[in-house]
Image (tube, grey):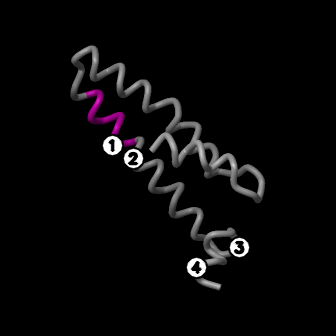
Amino acid sequence: MMVAALSSFGLPGGLGLIHGLSVLVLVMIPRGILQARRGNIAAHRRTMSLTYLSLAVAGMFTLLPGRLLGSWLFG
């Protein structure tokens, strides 16, 4: 997830909402790891679920018409 979030900043086309979600992922993953190390498994599970959901939403935004990946896949 970290690699996918970081790689979003190297794509052409400028910054947008997708990059905001990528920043969220970059903040939440270390937070989730810290929660797990402290033994707060419920908070870790919630943090990781929301982080995954954020990255999935960002991935769906890349398929919108007019976006590079959406144009490649759907013409």
Residue identifier under label 2:
52
Magenta stretch: residue 32 in it?
Answer: no
Q: Which residues are magenta?
A: 43-50
Residue identifier under label 1:
49
Where disc 3 sits, the SS reads: loop
Kindly identify the residue that appears in the image at 57 percent across and 70 percent down.
63
Kindly identify the residue that appears in the image at 27 percent across and 23 percent down.
36
Question: Going from the N terminus, do you reach mark 3 or mark 4 first?
Answer: 3
- For residue 70, which quarter of the picture? bottom right
Front residue (pair 46, 30):
30
Where disc 2 sits, the SS reads: helix
Disc marking residue 66: 3
Residue identifier under label 4:
73
Relative placement, left or right, of 41 versus 21 is left
Judge the density around disc 3: few (<14), some (14-19), many (≥20) Cα neighbours within 10 Å.
few
- C-alpha distance separating marks 4 and 2: 23 Å
Question: Going from the N terminus, do you reach mark 3 or mark 2 first?
Answer: 2
Question: Going from the N terminus, do you reach mark 3 or mark 1 first?
Answer: 1
Disc nearest the viewer among 4 and 1 = 4
